[in-house]
Amino acid sequence: MGRRNKKKKVYWVLGLPGLMRWWEADMAMMLSRHTRHEYVRWRCEPVKVVRLRPMMIAKFMEATKKPTDTLVFLDIDHAHPPHIVNSLVARDDLAIHTSLTFKRAPQMPTALAMDYNDGWDRSPEMVSGLNQGDILEVDRGGFGAVAVQRQVFSAILDLGYGIHNMFEYHGTADCDKHFAMLCQEAGYKQHVNTGLVSPHMTDIPSSITLEMWDKWAKDKGQPGVVSAA
């Protein structure tokens, strides 16, 4: 377990919708209540992630210097545990640390932990079995809740990309995949914490949970949750 560096700076951003529903507001209040007071929440307008993230990264790069200074992005459509920010930034040894999330589709709640072993233009290999509590090193995790250290952004900039290039859509590749490709080029893998789950919310409200994914995987003859922490 990496030791918490008390001197590092942590900023966190919760993407907001144009109109907030009660369960989103409740989750946001719980996050604010349980996040360490020295971790600064940056306010933002309800804009799409392809605009929000570059804006916050630019602000973050101006406000920080240490390689382990950390920027946390949270999506509003997840049932984040109240301690999510604290947990994501607790590991100085993980430059990109994400919670375990799932696709927002009850009929196919795929776990977002992917390796592109045959290249980024081919379908990825997705996790089909896990021991809950493991941290998976992958090419791409889910970005519903992610902590990214300054050193990652710096390495991407050193490759010649601009901040505005980090989250873009290219053909069929979404912005999270594009960022993962840049991370790989810069020499960074992503780490999915399977003991830290952020269920994907639907509009009922209900959510896509670990239990739902486990049942779906086992119905298909896959291992699902092999053991619990």
Image (tube, rainbow, N blue to C red):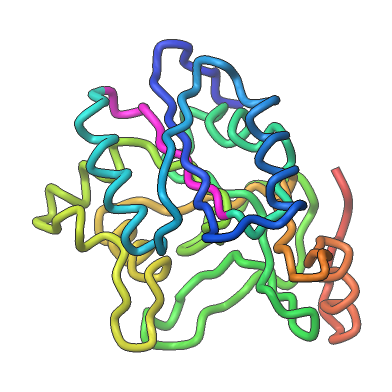
Which image quarter is the C terminus in?
top right
Asked if the magenta segment contains residue 223, the reply would be no
Instruction: Say left or right for 194 vs 185.
Output: right
Q: Position of residue 95 (x, y in %)?
A: 42, 40
* Image position, residue 189 (x, y; %): 42, 53
In the rendered structure, the answer to whether residue 84 lies left or right of residue 97 reads right
27 vs 65, nearest the viewer = 27
Q: Residue furthest left?
A: 160
**Which residue occupies 48% across, 64% down?**
140
Q: Is residue 228 left or right of residue 130?
A: right
The magenta segment is 66-75
Seen from the viewer's position, the closer of residues 139 and 87 is 87
Q: Residue furthest top?
A: 7
Instruction: Kindly identify the residue that appears in the image at 47 percent across and 11 percent down.
Output: 6
Quarter occupied by the N terminus: top right
> In the depicted view, which residue is nearer to us: 136 or 29?
29
Residue at figure coordinates x 29%, y 81% from the top left: 170
Q: Inspect the magenta stretch and tell me whether residue 67 lies in it.
A: yes
Residue 203 in the image: state x and y as whole percent.
75, 70
In the foreground, 40 or 24: 24
Is 92 located above or below residue 73 in the figure?
above
Q: Position of residue 212 (x, y in %)?
A: 86, 70
Q: Residue furthest front?
A: 19
Q: Quadrant of residue 59?
A: top left
Q: Which residue corresponds to the image point at 90% horizontal and 74% vertical from the top-left? A: 215
Q: Quadrant of residue 186?
A: bottom left
